[in-house]
Image (cartoon, grey):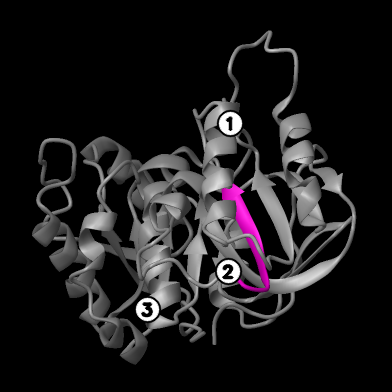
Amino acid sequence: MLKPPRVRAGALVGVIAPASPVRREFVDRGIAELSRLGFRTQVGAHLYARGRYTAGGWQERRDDLLALWKDTEVEAVFCARGGYGSMELLASLAPEIFREQPKVFLGASDVTAVHGFLGARAGVVAFHGPMVAQRIARGSYDAEGLLRLIQTPEPAGVLSAPDTLEILHRGSAEGTLLGGCLSIVVSLVGTPFLPPLEDAVLFLEDTLVKPYQIDRMLMQLKLAGCLDSVRGLVFGQMANCEQHPDQGYTLQEMLRDWTEHLGVPVLFGFPSGHTETDAVTLPLGIRARIDSEGLHLLEGAVA
């Protein structure tokens, strides 16, 4: 996996909307926050385009991604939001463009599809984290952790997590940190855009899906052989993932029972992606360890 160059203080950061439409006032708030962090910004030419339920046509969204990626002055590309639409871009992207000039690429939710492309086709480390018109705009993210990951090549060590991080199955394991939004990871099964999950520490998170739907998606991963040799599982906070407030069981109990047969360490409640607390950034494609203390990054994510 290629590591992108570190993002320097005062760097120019590109902002794109590869999926659903964005509202200008939310983007403006996010850009103000990036300015507070010391970054300059350049938005994609079609950032505010609107289709039926996407930020313009797929060609416009693809062109914004490629234009900012090829711009030698742009050191990182941050996504404004997720929603739906990122998968439409994948078949038209040439891996060599991203390998020849790797950059920090930040996003979550539907952007997991582009992370999959970067991992499976381009072999470039990607960053699962807060987005410009959402958590960055609201200030609901771990800014210090984000800056450390994209600006310093040293390993970050154990990542901060709330005291609510739960151990579903004890143990210790090392592997390549991969994953993202569960719904999108499952959507990539059977395509060339799902990175191989052998020997992975697999991070999975989602929101507003019911326990039986999570069961079904995990079963699809199992039947496709994707869980046969994972080293460990880390679940996100899984915000609002319940059948009913009085359903009589917790999601943690369901996931503990479901994953028991895998025989690997399993954590629940890591705050990345759709979270109930400040969102933490995860670099996808680097070596990591899972144990009773949490999630440890064993190498830096940038060069």
Q: Which of marks 1 and 3 is in front?
A: 3
Secondary structure category for the residue under label 1: loop
At a point 45% along the width and 44% down the height, the residue shown is 183
- Asked whether the residues under the numbered discs 2 and 1 touch, taking CB atoms below 8 Å apart as contact, a structural biologist would say no
| Snapshot quadrant of residue 193 | bottom left
Horizontal side, residue 172 vs residue 245: left or right: right
Residue under circle 1?
239
Horizontal side, residue 264 vs residue 154: left or right: right
Counting every numbered tag in the picture gives 3
In front of the other: 10 or 287: 287
| Snapshot quadrant of residue 262 | bottom right
At a point 85% along the width and 49% down the height, the residue shown is 169
Q: How far apart are marks 2 and 1 (CA)?
A: 25 Å
Q: Nearer the viewer, mark 2 or mark 1?
A: 2
Residue 121: which numbered mark, if any?
3
In front of the other: 156 or 293: 293
Q: Could one spot residue 147 in this view of the protein?
A: no
At a point 26% along the width and 66% down the height, the residue shown is 90
Residue furthest toward the bottom?
Answer: 100
Residue under circle 2?
197
The residue carrying pointer 2 sits among few (fewer than 14), some (14 to 19) or many (20 or more) residues within 10 Å by Cα, namely: many
Start and end of the magenta stretch? 198-205
| Image x and y of residue 291, in percent | 85, 60
Secondary structure category for the residue under label 2: loop
Secondary structure category for the residue under label 3: helix
Q: Earlier in the sequence, mark 1 or mark 3?
A: 3
| Snapshot quadrant of residue 77 | bottom left
At a point 25% along the width and 42% down the height, the residue shown is 20
Residue type beneath disc 2: Leu
